[in-house]
Amino acid sequence: MNILVTGGTGYIASHTAVKLLAAGHQLVLVDNLANSNIAVLDRIALLSGQKPHFYQADIGNYAALSAIFTAHQIDAVIHFAGLKAVGESAQKPLHYYRENVAGSLQLLEVMQEFAVKSLIFSSSATVYGDPRELPLTEQSPIQPQSVYGRTKWMVEQIIADHCSADPSFSAVCLRYFNPVGAHPSGLMGEDPNGIPNNLLPFISQVAIGRREQLSVFGNDYPTADGTGVRDYIHVQDLAEGHRLALKLTHTPGCHRFNLGTGSGVSVLEMVDAFRAVSGHPVPLIICPRRTGDVAACYADAAKAQHELGWQAQLNLTDMVADTWRWQQLNPQGYQTPPAKLKEKL
Ligand code: NAD
Ligand code: WQD
């Protein structure tokens, strides 16, 4: 298929791109580089032997989008583009609604204009908010607790309404749990700007010596060791989930799937796994809870298994080992000069 990948140089999209190119798909990537690095394209080319078409453009820009749809016969769109920082979304709500909601609306309108009838959308487990019961199924109550979470749920609703109005349109909303890990080559991974918000990139930067210690946000949760429990999912498994979701391209309607492993890992378990794999110390201090955090969150991913034939294959050790390989090879993320990278490979 000819697939347009929005947010194409981002963390999850870049791993998905390598997987889709290996499966024989043709890709057109679009990204405004708000949160990614152009160097990702060379890494994709190195891993796949192909350099996909790339446009530096904003999905909110009608002229740019329609030029891309004019230049390429697109069969399906995988829509990753968006902003994802929960804290920032509370400070800049209008910006988040503009980028995530209005941007998605613009994309859907251009798809309609060019009669492109198939979409896969990056949603998030954050739409469930504070779970009333675990594990979370696709039927669990929706109650997003952040502006970011509400943008994801709004886009899901817009997509569902569009599917009702156009019975030939097919949409798949994938609700990712906590994506972590990196490509097993160590050539691609997560490269957050500034201080990482998320647990695993932070631990990784502590282990490599870029940061002094991890702040553990609360050890008084009603969990086995008192720290927060999450369903961490390897980015390579997520990438495979997108490949399999393409099966539904010709099945009209709005399909929703959880993508998680189904098991929870605590903050301290993650730290222990990292110490064991890296052999490096991870100094930590216990701090107060972070506002908005829930005690525990993990998926029931049975629907994805039954309907897509998808199941997470990689375990916690894989997630940590691949993160650590990426961190060691690229201590400055994608800023790491290619010559330095070659020395280490
Ligand atoms: P990312 O920031 O690495 O990737 C998003 C990409 O979109 C970036 O490359 C950014 O430059 C680009 N982008 C942002 N706004 C754009 C715009 N208006 N036009 C064009 N490009 C734009 O994030 P990621 O972790 O790869 O996440 C991908 C998607 O998955 C996002 O929609 C995110 O909300 C969703 N998601 C992420 C997680 C997670 O924890 N990583 C969890 C659930 C859902
Ligand atoms: C995991 C656990 C923290 C950092 C976020 C978004 C969510 C989704 C995935 C996009 C929690 C603890 C963390 C640290 C810590 N993204 N922690 N010290 O909050 O589950 O989910 O990313 O859709 O929307 O909210 O992930 O990695 O930030 O935190 O103790 O420095 O690690 O309290 O228990 P979270 P996270």
Image (spheres, grey):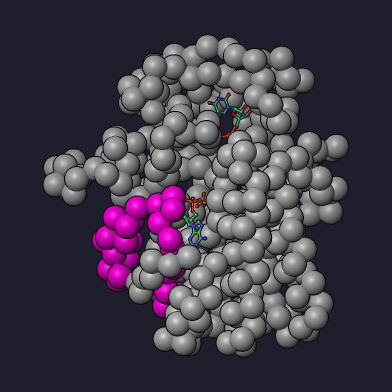
Does residue 193 lie above or below 176 as drawn?
A: above
Instruction: Work out whether residue 185 can be spotted.
Output: no
Q: Residue 15 location in percent, x, y?
A: 43, 57
* Image-quadrant location for residue 247: bottom right
Residue for point 61% across, 20% down = 217
Residue for point 52% across, 46% down = 234
Is residue 45 located in the magenta-colored stretch of the structure? yes
Residue for point 40% across, 52% down = 36
Q: Residue 138 location in percent, x, y?
A: 79, 54
- 27 left or right of 41 in image: right
Does residue 250 lie above or below 217 as drawn?
A: below
Instruction: Work out whether residue 171 can be spotted.
Output: yes
Is residue 87 located in the magenta-colored stretch of the structure? no
- 259 left or right of 158 in image: left
Q: Residue 25 location in percent, x, y?
A: 44, 76
* Image-quadrant location for residue 167: bottom right
Residue for point 56% across, 78% down = 76
Relative depth, front residue between 330 and 194: 194
Q: Which residues are magenta?
A: 22-51
Which quadrant of the rendered structure holds the C terminus?
Answer: top left
